[in-house]
Amino acid sequence: MTGPDRIAELSQRITTLTGQILSRDEVMTVVGRAFEHQVDLDDDGQLRALLGGLASSPVVRGPAVAAPQPGRPAVPPREPSPSGATAKTAAVLALLGGIANLAIGAVFFATGNYVSENDTMPGWYHAVYYVVAGGSVIVGGALLTGAVMMFRRKRFGPRIVAVGCALCLAVFFGDLAMTFAAADEGGVGMSGSPGRHLSGLVFPVLTLVLVLLPSTKRWVMREALLADGHLLPSQVPSDSPIPRTKTRGVVHIAGIVLVAASVVAGGVFVVNHFVRTQSTRTQSTTASSPDRRQIELPFADFDIVPLYGIAIDTGGNVYVSAEAGMFKLAPDTAAPIKLPFPKLRSTSYNEWHGPSDVAVDVAGNVYATYGQANRVLKLAVGASAPSELPLTDLGWPRGVAVDAAGNVYVADADGDNPRVLKLAVGADAPTKLPFVELEKPAGVAVDAGGNVYVTDVGAVHNGVFKLAAGSRTSTELPFNGWSRRSGIVVDTAGDIYVVDEHAKKVLKLAVGADAPTTLPFGDLNSPRAVAVDSTGDVYVIDGSGSNDRVVKLYAQ
């Protein structure tokens, strides 16, 4: 509808509502007052209230015009254009928030597969991770669209920005709830102070407050009304009061309540979880204070981190696989020596990596998996270089073990074909062991009786499983509850030791027991590999990469 048609239609509606016939200038005065007080002219109730407020004002009789001066045309006074400071600030914040949310969504989508493969979160976390990523993209699109429309002074711009802010708050709280729920199931959870996480509320809340201010709408709507012919640039709004409608008051109050409730709820939510988490950590630290039998071996003094796997031979030598290579620490020595295991090139990236896991047989031969290079190497006693074992078509070899006869076992976490392989002595190809429904096998161990054990850190099929010698099906061991149990080893008595990364514990399942016990390690940060020697001393790799260490707990 053109400007003149719109004015004629409005004049007819005013006549219908009040019985008065107004001139064009008087109708334009009404339009100007409606713009000033943010009255929706399409709403009969708001229009009637506006006309009621103008009924006693002389401005309805016609616009005030300055008296003409001799030789000069009459110049009507002009209303100063709104500065738009709040609107422009809101638009800039919306623009920045939109870019940030699109970037976050892109990063989440790009890293989703990596998180699924490597993160220490519950299985459902990975699906919700993509939901949050999609939500961030939607929020980013809404904020960018609204910001552009506000800069172009389109009337729906502030509304779209407000919707984007509301969605941003929903994604924010959804992400917090997801993280906290994962932490309650043993995941990484929230680190740092509550204020650090509540800072994520600042941008959406501030943007929402600014976009709801009347001055923001006035600045945006002025150009929209001018473009539609609803307002003349020379129109002078009166300062006489206009009754506010209940609808606008309710909307503003609802917006204020939403913002306040979001801030308060977020603060209570984060602080409550933080206090509960800190309390749990304090209790855990107190309950697991370092045992006097616990010492740290001298691996951290040398620049060989991160550390990955650990094994002990019959002579008490400690072998550690690391990004920097393979290292051996002899008993009663102060420094490890480096074994001639090379770095191998990744099959997926142009990167070179050290060995992932390590095992040693009764003869002293050392075996290493290379997860990134999909290979398994063996360093024979006295050899100057390792040789490659005939284990082909590996997808992601992780854990490795060897039995008393020299048979080699490898946990292959290939996403399409997860399995445990056995390479018999003298064989030129491995066989697949009949473990049931493996998803992401991590650690593998074998006992003196030929029973094979594997840990599975998959999102669905998660636990510790045993394949008895000669059996055609595996059984699950009583390490109850969802967690991330990766490293595993069996001692000479048949007791099973498992690292629980989520609980930051080392568990021991004794022969015949129906539940594991927790070993008295203290102050473990991120344990991931375990070994045991012939005397029952237990060794654990602990840390988060840059601060890795090897901790030993004496049996006596």
Image (spheres, rainbow, N blue to C red):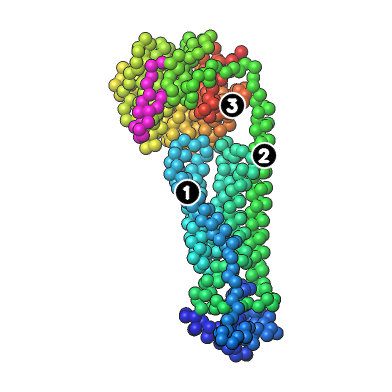
User: Which quarter of the figure has residue 472?
Assistant: top left
Left or right: 288 in relation to 101: right
Chain-order first, disc 3 or disc 2: 2
Chain-order first, disc 2 or disc 1: 1
Badge 3 density bin: few <14, some 14–19, many ≥20, Cα 10 Å? many
Say whether marks 2 and 1 touch (CB < 8 Å): no
Secondary structure at numbered mark 2: helix
Q: Nearer the viewer, residue 360 or 50?
A: 50
Q: Nearer the viewer, residue 509 or 409?
A: 409
- Judged by depth in the image, the label closer to the viewer, 2 or 1, is 1
Q: Position of residue 435 (x, y in %)?
A: 42, 30
Q: Is residue 551 visible?
A: yes
Q: Mark 1 is on which residue type?
A: Ala
Residue corresponding to mark 3: 524
Tell which residue pokes out farthest to the left in this image: 428
Secondary structure at numbered mark 1: helix
Residue corresponding to mark 2: 276
Left or right: 303 in relation to 68: left
User: Which quadrant holds the C terminus?
Assistant: top right
Secondary structure at numbered mark 3: loop
Which residue occupies 58% across, 57% down? Answer: 207
Secondary structure character of the magenta stretch overall: loop
- Judged by depth in the image, the label closer to the viewer, 3 or 1, is 1
Q: Which residues are magenta?
A: 339-355
Q: Mark 2 is on which residue type?
A: Arg
Numbered tag placed on residue 103 in the rendering: 1
